Amino acid sequence: MIDSHNHTSFSEDCKIPLNEMIESAISKGIKHYTITDHLDLDYQDKRFTFSLDHQARREAIFKAQAFYKPKINIYYGLECGVQPHIIKEAEAVIQKEQFDFVIASMHTTHKKDLYTQAFYHGLKPLEAYKAYINEFAWCCEVMNEFSVVGHLDIVKRYDLSLNEVNLEDVKDEICQLLKIIIEKGKGIEINTSGFNDIFQHAFPHPTILKWYKELGGSIITLGSDAHFPEKIAQHYEEALNQIESCGFENITVFKHMKPFEIPISDVRASLKLDIL
């Protein structure tokens, strides 16, 4: 079992201690567990900083790796919020820390926050969708120090009118982003938190996942984006069904920024009924 996107109390938006999250993961049969706390430099909602005490976090995770081995493989990861003006600074941190895995996620666009809906003001749904994807693509073109892009179409979570956008109307923009990812040897994550909302699918939408496959994409990771123990590995059965329906046979895990694959059949076999 795999969960490659998880938060702990080192993330400003999570209050659960590292050990409590790990214990829950073990109880659910997780064997490959990646801690990806938030680093969002110059986050636009100034109520939050989303900075990290890297030394304290690193020491805690390395200690946990030794303590919980061989029950679970714990990986030292990061969810890095991307904006055009912070790429160099973020990459310097990533290079210094030598993470196992880095998710590049966009939580702000045009220096405006998605969560507070500041970004959407004055924009029609299609305009907002395209602006988000285009800026994300620019960041991925410039940035090298990442493994996968996170919750690729999360822009529709915070303004539900974007769900009315026909994906065909943003296909060119989305496929350009996907081509950049593929050409750089990067991947996309399947983020099951979408099932916790109204969407009834993981992020990204299955149509986007199919386009990724058709363009030659092969690297996909699987994560719950859990901020609470009970959310770890949630909705995996539904997510695996969507992944397989798009033609994928393996889930990728990263260690020392190097990918290795685990067959979906093995992931499915390890599912425990209490988390379906």
Image: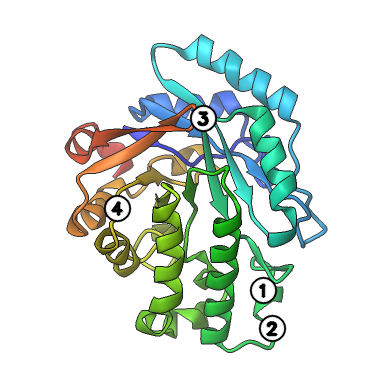
Residue holding disc 1? 117
Residue holding disc 3? 100
Residue holding disc 4? 239
**Which sits earlier in the primary sequence, circle 2 or circle 3?**
3
Please name the amino acid that badge 2 sits on.
His
**Quick check: can you spot residue 193?**
no
**Quick check: can you spot residue 162?**
yes
- Taking 68 as reference, is 108 left or right? right
Q: Which element carries disc 1, helix, strand or loop? A: loop
Which of the numbered marks, if any, corresponds to residue 221? none
Q: Which element carries disc 3, helix, strand or loop? A: loop
* Residue at the extreme right of the image, as rendered: 46
Q: Which x, y percent locates residue 149?
A: 49, 53
Q: Residue at x 54, y 44 (%)?
A: 146
Whole-angstrom CA distance, mark 1 to mark 4, is: 27 Å
In what quadrant of the picture does the C terminus appear? top left
**Which sits earlier in the primary sequence, circle 3 or circle 4?**
3
Which label lies toward us, 2 or 3? Answer: 3
Whole-angstrom CA distance, mark 1 to mark 2, is: 7 Å
Whole-angstrom CA distance, mark 2 to mark 3, is: 37 Å
